[in-house]
Each structure stands twice: as C-alpha cells, then as structure tokens.
Image (tube, helix red, strand yellow):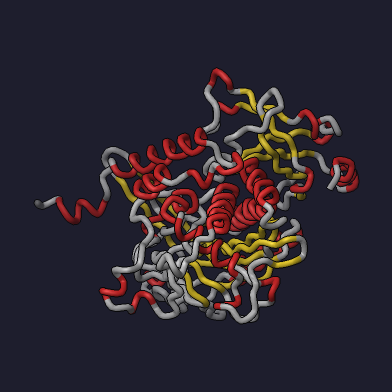
C-alpha cells in the first residue's frame, strides 16, 4: 500500500486518529496517536518522535530521542476504538536516519534481506500456532510478606462443586480433556468466533479455531502463513484482537506458557519453509517425509543451534515450566514426520509441494516474533550453508513415541535447556550464526542476555509459596 493509498483510506473511512506503533525487545507493542489532521505524506518520511529511554533495553537518557518510520503495508483499521482509528506498525530509526540495531522489526527485515543475498531463496514463510487461555478472572501478588496467583474459569475441572454459578450446570472440562469437544462442554465457541470475525475484518486470513487440550479455557486460532516480517506483524494483530475481545466479554486472555500447574501449557508451534520465487525448496517426492536435502539441512541447523535458539524462542522463566515431560511438550531435540513428541515435526497429512514445511514445536508466545522468526531462519540457513545432516548428527528421525522409549534409548536424545539461565548460557556460547549478514549485532545479543538474566534473577530470589509446603516445619 502506498502512502497515497493510506491517505485515501483515512479520508474515505473518516479516520479521526492514526495510531503509530512499534515493538520492544519483549514483543510488546507501544503506540503514539496523532489526529488524522496532523498526518500527511511528510509524516511517512520524517516519522514520529518518541522517548527511547523509557523503553526497557533501548537507549539511555543521554541519547533518548528516537523516530518511528511508518510502514504503510502494515496498516489496518482498529476494531475497538470509539473514534475511527488507523493502526500502523513502524520501524525504529535514530534521529540521523540510521536503522536502529535494537529494533526487533528491523532485525526481522534484515533477516529477510540476508536470505535473499544468500542465494538460497527469495522468501521464507512462517505460520505460528499461538495457543492461549481465556480465564474468567486472574489475581496475583508478589510482596515481601505474600506471594500468590489465582485464576478461575467456569469450565475448569476444579469447579465441579462450585455453587457461585447460581446453580452449577456441570459440563466441566477435566485435566487434559479439552481437545475439540462440542458445546456445551466447549463453552467458548462464540467468543472465539467473535475473535475470528474481527481478525478477518482486520485483514487476517483465519483457517480455523477450536478448544485446546487443557482445562479452563485453552484455545487455538490459526491464521494463514505469510513472509517473516508480515507474519510477525500479523501475530501482534492477532494477540491485540484476542486480548481486547476477551476484555469486552468480561474475561481475560493470556499467552503465558504455563499458567496452570498439572495440565498442558500453551506453545507457539512455528511452521516455516523457503521458496525461490514460486518454487518450494523443501519438497522432494519420495524422500523421507518428502523433504528435500535443503530442508534436511535447515532442520539440522535448527536442532544444532536449538539450545541457543531457545533463549530467543522461549525467553521467559515460565517457558521452562512448560518444557517438562508429560504434557505434550517437545523437550526432545529430534525430528519426525507427524510425531508431536519431537521438537521438529514434519506435517505429512494432506500436504502439497507448496505446503511442505517443518514445524518447530518448542517455541512459545513469550517470544518476540520478529526476533524468534529471524533467529529460526538464521539457524536454518546456517544448517544449509554448512550442510548439517540431522540424521548423521543423531537427531532422528524418531517415528515412535519418545516418551515411551526405554531409558537407555532416551539417554541418547538431547533435551532442551532446563532453565532460562541455561538457555542464555548456550546463547552466549553460540551466537555467531545470528550475526551473519549483520542481522543481529553482538551489542543486541549482549543487551538481550543482560535483560533476561535480570528477569531470571528476579524470579530466583523470591520466596515461592510451595517452599512453605516443603520447608516451613523443617
């Protein structure tokens, strides 16, 4: 969409405000709103100024001025504001016009540029399956003398005896019993359908929605794949719509990987493939899972760099509460066709040559999608460049339930890091693949590690409620 087309959209839809947005290191969107009367063609050249020192991980107060440069291709009309508003994602630049090296969206774009310069292909496509919970209530507190969290849902398995509903009508979902039941067991059909309706009106092509495995309102909505940066933009739009629809319905949505102890967590399984023009590069008929040698090398790169990669695709302490055996979590660094117990699954049902892809199942939605997709692409490209063979490296294929393997066989399988600190250690030891082509800089990686170390320490030094159960009477 050209600048002129955006200006025409503003006029034709009687847009009163234009909301300029950027994303921080953690993947949260921030915005500054201008009256549409203050927006003209020059706005898209000169940008919108903001204070970078107020954004964690950006700039110090002595060099705080930064500029948002709007990307016209990302615009959509906000479905929630009372006053007609057009939302536009932006890239971050320094006041002298240079691309800011810590801008996650800029890093995603540099990854796409690096792919094209590599000669491997012209475009990488991504499709995240971002799971989430819809709760009726959330309460939490962390102080020096108290620490707790509590979430609730009318459909939760723990509420079979609750009286506060004005007469309990049953149909509660048991632990691990929530995968695609019909109503009245699935009580959230209408709220998910409303989310889908607004996604479609906002330009997303939605493929399906359903209840997920866990109790208490776990859900999944799938939208159509696109190129790397566009998919990351779409994921931010997706989360924005889900969070605001939940709020409108008097509920709350969360993409937290493990909000409940003892049931499945929420992942963000990421499908990816590379094309050269219109030609898919991952397909070879008759090979294992119909994967080409290039696709196998791509898999080899992701699994080889996985411990470091996971610091970016699973960048929270809570991520590693999900990455434990027994809850369909892909903790084993192997690949397989159709096997959901592997870190990388190759979908084989009803797949065409252009639909041939790999699914990296380890990530979750605490990841910044611009960083996560860029890092995945760089790991895969490094595997292609070095011709890393996942079979020779011992990563599979494993076409049986890994959780049921004898202990001796399990010992031969590499697992994901056990904590965020372990993943950050791995990233510090293995980051050169990220700096290829100047996509990530050493400064960015060092800064990212420092921020995440601080988060891990903040959790580690606090008293946990379960410690009272274990140690109070010692």
When asked about the image quadrant of residue 105, the answer is top right
Residue 343 position within the rendered picture, expressed as x and y whole percent measured from the top left: 46, 66
Please name the residue shown 47% across and 78% down the image.
Answer: 171
Left or right: 158, with 60 as reference point: left
Looking at the rendered structure, the number of numbered marks drawn on it comes to: 0
When asked about the image quadrant of residue 406, the answer is bottom left
Residue, far top: 62
Residue 190 position within the rendered picture, expressed as x and y whole percent measured from the top left: 63, 69
Say if residue 441 shows up in the picture: yes
Query: Relative to 24, does residue 322 appear above or below in the rendering?
Result: below
Query: Relative to 118, does residue 100 appear above or below in the rendering?
Result: above
Left or right: 365, with 395 as reference point: right
Residue 447 position within the rendered picture, expressed as x and y whole percent measured from the top left: 47, 34
Query: Relative to 180, does residue 473 appear above or below in the rendering?
Result: above
Please name the residue shown 38% across and 59% down the image.
Answer: 416
Q: Looking at this view, is 164 or 364 the one in front?
A: 364
Query: Relative to 463, does residue 333 appear above or below in the rendering?
Result: below
Q: Looking at this view, is 402 or 179 the one in front?
A: 402
Please name the residue shown 67% across and 45% down the image.
Answer: 109
Residue 403 position within the rendered picture, expressed as x and y whole percent measured from the top left: 35, 75
Q: Looking at this view, is 129 or 243 the one in front?
A: 129
Left or right: 457, with 209 as reference point: left
Left or right: 10, with 235 as reference point: right
Say if residue 170 shows up in the picture: no
Please name the residue shown 39% across and 48% down the image.
Answer: 426
Residue, far left: 474
């Amino acid at each position: 969409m050209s600048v002129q087309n955006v200006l025409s959209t503003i006029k034709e839809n009687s847009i009163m405000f234009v909301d300029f947005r950027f994303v921080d290191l953690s993947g949260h969107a921030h915005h500054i709103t201008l009256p549409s009367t203050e927006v003209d063609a020059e706005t898209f050249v000169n940008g919108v100024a903001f204070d970078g020192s107020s954004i964690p991980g950006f700039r110090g107060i002595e060099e705080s001025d930064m500029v948002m440069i709007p990307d016209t291709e990302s615009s959509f009309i906000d479905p929630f504001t009372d006053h007609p508003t057009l939302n536009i994602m932006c890239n971050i630049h320094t006041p002298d016009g240079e691309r800011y090296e810590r801008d996650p969206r800029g890093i995603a774009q540099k990854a796409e540029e690096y792919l094209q310069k590599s000669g491997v292909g012209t475009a990488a496509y991504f499709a995240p399956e971002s799971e989430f919970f819809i709760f009726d209530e959330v309460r939490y507190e962390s102080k020096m003398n108290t620490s707790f969290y509590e979430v609730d849902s009318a459909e939760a398995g723990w509420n079979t005896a609750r009286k506060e509903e004005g007469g309990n009508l049953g149909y509660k979902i048991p632990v691990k019993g929530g995968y695609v039941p019909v109503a009245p067991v699935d009580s959230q059909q209408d709220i998910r359908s409303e989310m889908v309706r607004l996604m479609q009106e906002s330009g997303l092509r939605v493929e399906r929605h359903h209840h997920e495995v866990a109790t208490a309102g776990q859900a999944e909505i799938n939208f159509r794949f696109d190129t790397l940066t566009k998919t990351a933009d779409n994921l931010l739009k997706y989360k924005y719509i889900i969070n605001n629809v939940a709020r409108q319905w008097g509920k709350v949505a969360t993409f937290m990987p493990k909000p409940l102890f003892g049931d499945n967590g929420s992942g963000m399984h990421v499908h990816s493939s590379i094309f050269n023009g219109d030609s898919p590069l991952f397909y070879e008929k008759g090979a294992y899972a119909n994967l080409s040698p290039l696709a196998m090398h791509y898999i080899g790169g992701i699994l080889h760099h996985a411990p470091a990669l996971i610091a970016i695709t699973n960048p929270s302490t809570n991520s590693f509460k999900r990455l434990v055996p027994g809850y369909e979590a892909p903790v084993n660094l192997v690949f397989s066709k159709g096997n959901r117990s592997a870190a990388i699954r190759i979908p084989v049902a009803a797949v065409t040559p252009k639909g041939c892809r790999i699914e990296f199942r380890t990530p979750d939605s605490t990841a910044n999608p611009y960083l996560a997709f860029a890092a995945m692409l760089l790991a895969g490209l490094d595997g292609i460049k070095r011709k890393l063979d996942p079979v020779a490296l011992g990563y599979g294929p494993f076409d049986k339930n890994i959780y049921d393997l004898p202990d001796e066989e399990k010992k031969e399988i590499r697992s994901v890091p056990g904590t965020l600190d372990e993943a950050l250690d791995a990233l510090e030891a293995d980051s050169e693949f990220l700096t290829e082509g100047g996509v990530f800089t050493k400064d960015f990686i060092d800064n990212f590690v420092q921020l995440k170390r601080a988060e891990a320490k903040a959790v580690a030094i606090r008293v946990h409620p379960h410690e009272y159960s274990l140690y109070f009477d010692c």
